[in-house]
Amino acid sequence: MDARQKAMFDYCIAFGDDSLTLGHRLSEWCSNGPFLEEDLALTNVALDFIGRARMFYAHAAEVEGEGRDEDDYAYLRDCREYRNFLLHELPNGDFAFTMARQLMVDVFDVGFFGQLAGSKDPDLAAIGAKALKESRYHLRRSEDWIRRLGDGTDESHRRVQDAFEQLWGYAAELFEMPAAEQHLADAGIAVDRAALKPGWTATMQNVLQEATLEVPAGGWSIGGGRDGMHTEHLGYLLAEMQFLQRAYPGLTW
Amino acid sequence: MTEKPLQADPRLATFEAKVANEERIEPKDWMPDAFRKTVLRQMSQHAHSEVIGMQPEGNWITRAPTLYRKIVLLAKIQDECGHGLYLYSAAETLGTSREEMVQALHEGKAKYASIFNYPSLTWADIGMIGWLVDGAAIVNQVSLQRTSYGPYARAMIRICKEESFHQRQGFDATMALARGSAEQKAMAQDALNRWWWPSLMMFGPHDSDSAHSGQSMKWKLKRESNDVLRQRFVDQTVPQAEFIGLKIPDPDLKWNEQRGSYDFGEIDWDEFHRVIAGNGPCNRQRLAHHVRAHENGQWVRDAMHAYEMKRKSRDAA
Amino acid sequence: MKQQNLPLFEVFVRSKRGLDHRHVGSLHAEDPAQALEYARDVYLRRSEGVSIWVVRSSDITASQESDVEMFCDPMDDKPYRHATHFNLPKEVDNM
């Protein structure tokens, strides 16, 4: 692959990894939801994310052109090769933590996919358009939940406030652009994520205020996902996810 | 409220005529108290089964070996959740509430299908549950599409439409193993050895030993006998196992030309009763999981209610 | 404080343009907006519809079985309301 193709490959893999890790986390709620209707709804969101991962991986495979497929990417790469944002790999915590993280991701995704739908690369544009529809629905849900939890009981308010305090520093990474990605953005292919930050911040502030929550003071950030520098959580996530493929290599399932 | 003696009640004749005519009994219709209690018990236990059934399969979501198997499994379990929802809705037409039914489950007053008290030990178990457990459920549910209580029959029709996908994905996953490496094939055979007899037990005791069967058949809640349904399941499944080269763990299994059906061995009724009585491998674990999820969700449900109350008073102001 | 039940909502789905909404079941939610979203998740996974209505179950007024006699029977003796009642000569029996 030349430099441009490599940049494209890395781009698709990274967003595929974001989608897969978060989809996997959401799938952990199955049979554990606070009531049946919400259990079912969360699973729908998980399915959207994993479906999105498959689309990104499929495009990555085309660009790479070496005959690897989605399962090679998902099941045969170790942590240091995964490129997802740290926010997406964090364990679910309680329902407040899950929905707080989800809101942060959904606000970003609506902004991001809205732009990606205009990419000069037709495959990325198609993924963007589809993901935008899904993300709008996800955002409706997560906004509603943050309002209900923030302005619900004292306990729910405390839980969701704590969640945002713990999560806030993971947002910075969403808006950092590595050089290769910046070149792709300049070429009209990738989204300028840095430009999404003001919109994201404003939306988050609005929703939190409506939910009677305080916007965390911040002042700290943790990142490194796009460079394969992950939290300790990813290792466990992959160990569980990849077990069968690693224990019984090279088979068809 | 005075209660007429059952035999003298003219409404009973109307009720029985509807049943005899294959007309559905609907929620607002008069029905004998025992009928209402039986239908409610049957529907709520069916609903509980769907929800508890999410657990043994949910156990392998995070370990599904390919992205395709992962999403198919998720979609399938989501359907089971939906089935629980349809059935709880149908049961609520009889004047109970979901909270009451869940309470009965937690207190051990309501049961759920014993099959889900077995553990899913390997990936092969997932295919087996789809192929055998859903296969058995389909035989039962197709029959129930003609059950006499309207909301139950309609829920069954909706469920049957979705259930066929469940069995097909289970068979497909099993077939992949049976046609795979020696280890995969052994994994599938081991899972079949463990799930075959519990699947046959899903159809319940011999009709001669069943306390509820007689009355349920009379009211057309139940349309066919346990043994008839069990035989139908065996006859349809044996050729499927033969097709993929897996061996049913029954030395007495034999084609009976005269009957046009398979003869098969006797179920271990001690095991059957033990598991129903609460001493299967996973009974306590399944219930504890359900209780935990419910209790962990209490603060969320409280928050929703508090928010709604605040919103209402804001709107009213 | 033990939470009482979430309210029950009935769900109606229009499967295709030109058809009526049909009752498909019920679910629990705190308010109509949430009920609509859950209805989409529970009842529309296989693209079974283009439109959803949700109604609080407590808002539905239903006829009683005892009403059937006076609500419905008087309709039975007026067959002239049905097209099949009128036998027309074959040559013009296409209306």
Image: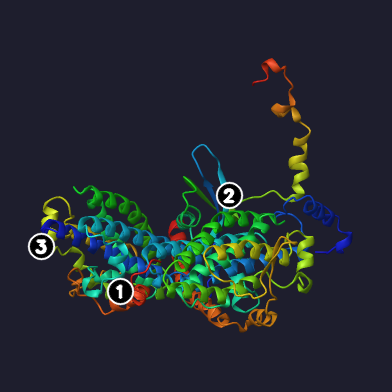
Image location of residue B30, percent across then percent down = 76, 56
Who's the residue at 64% across and 62% down the image?
B91
Q: Nearer the viewer, residue B54 or B13?
A: B54
> Where does label 3 land, which residue?
A179
Q: Does the image show residue B84?
A: no
Image location of residue C65, percent across then percent down = 74, 50
Q: Quadrant of residue C95?
A: top right
Q: What amino acid does circle 3 point to?
A: Ala
As drawn, which residue projects farthest toward the top?
C91
SS class of the residue under badge 1? loop
Who's the residue at 60% across and 82% down the image?
B280
What chain is tagged by disc 2?
C
Which tag is nearer the camera, tag 1 or tag 3? Answer: 3
What is the spatial separation of the Cα atoms under label 1 and label 3, in whole angstroms? Answer: 26 Å
Q: Are marks 2 and 1 in contact (CB under 8 Å)?
A: no
> Where does label 1 land, which residue?
A90
What chain is tagged by disc 3?
A
Who's the residue at 51% across and 61% down the image?
B79
Who's the residue at 77% across and 72% down the image?
B211
Badge 1 and badge 3 both on one subunit: yes
Which tag is nearer the camera, tag 2 or tag 1? Answer: 1
Q: Residues within 10 Å of mark 2 (few under 14, many from 20)?
A: some
What is the spatial separation of the Cα atoms under label 3 and label 2, in whole angstroms? Answer: 55 Å
> Where does label 2 land, which residue?
C23
Is the residue A156 above or below the residue B155 in the image?
below
